[in-house]
Amino acid sequence: MQHDPLYQHLTDEAGTITWQELQPHFARGVLVVVAESLDLIEVATRFARDEQDAVARWATTGQVARACDADARRWILANPLLQAVVVAPWVLVQEPRRH
């Protein structure tokens, strides 16, 4: 998938962002958390292509979910830089990988 033009475009558009910058998207209910075990850009590519089966599988396993109040509380306390990419209307985010 990494040689896919859409994947490359989303890679170029992705970046780091603070929780403060993400709060308006959380308030609108469009912030989606992607598990660190997944490739953020692959998930974004499948969102962009409306691949509902793949997204539904990840949602069923909890690997992709709308950000919840517990996420917001954790980010307020930790103030992390999150990886993010926009696939309108969604903003997909991923916490930094833990070592």
Image: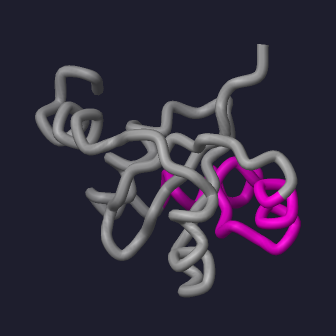
Task: Say whether residue 81 is magenta.
Answer: no
Characterize the magenta stretch by its predominant secondary structure. helix
User: Quadrant of the rendered structure where residue 7 is?
Assistant: top left
Left or right? Give the position of 81 relative to 25: right
Give x and y (percent) for residue 19.
63, 58
User: Quadrant of the rendered structure where residue 14 is?
Assistant: top left
Taking the spot 33% from the left edge, 62% from the top edge, the residue there is 87
* Placement of 26 over or under 56, stated as above or below: below
The magenta stretch is 53-76
User: Quadrant of the rendered structure where residue 77 is?
Assistant: bottom right
Q: How many marks?
A: 0
Give x and y (percent) for residue 83.
51, 41
Left or right? Give the position of 30 relative to 86: right
Q: Kindly give the residue lying farthest to the top in the view shown.
A: 99
Give x and y (percent) for residue 75.
77, 55
Taking the spot 45% from the left edge, 45% from the top edge, the residue there is 43
